[in-house]
Amino acid sequence: MSDTLSHLKRFDSLFPACGSENSAIELTGDELFNYSFAKQWVDVCKGWHEEEMEEAVAMNDEKD
């Protein structure tokens, strides 16, 4: 998996929604990629790295 998947790599299992509104399955990141016929990973997550979160908190504290 590419480095852009790093926000999901931290999880052993993923639970994507599927079918009805109250159903999901347990998959690994590799399984999700393969079963979804994905062509590539896209990073849509922002601010989850601890350093980024600490910076955001510090900036908010400075505003107060």
Image: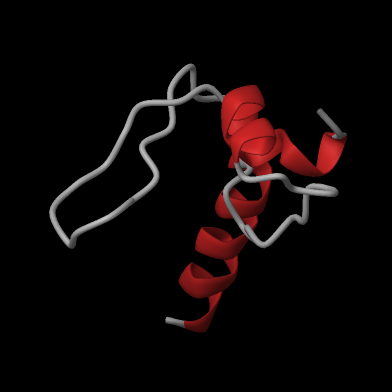
Q: Residue at x 77, y 56 (%)?
A: 42
- The quarter of the picture where residue 5 lies is top right
Height in image: 30 above or below 62? Answer: above
Give the residue at x 17% y 62%.
Answer: 21
Whether 11 is drawn above or below 51: the answer is: above
> Viewed as shown, does residue 15 lie left or right of 41?
left
Q: Residue furthest top?
A: 12
The answer to which of 25 and 53 lies nearer the viewer is: 25
Q: Is residue 63 left or right of residue 55?
A: left
Residue appearing at x 84%, y 48% in the figure: 40
Q: Quadrant of the C terminus?
A: bottom left
Residue sticking out furthest to the bottom: 63
From this view, report whether residue 18 is shown above or below residue 11.
Answer: below
Residue 12 on image: x %, y %: 48, 17
12 vs 3, left or right, is left
Q: Position of residue 1 (x, y in %)?
A: 81, 28
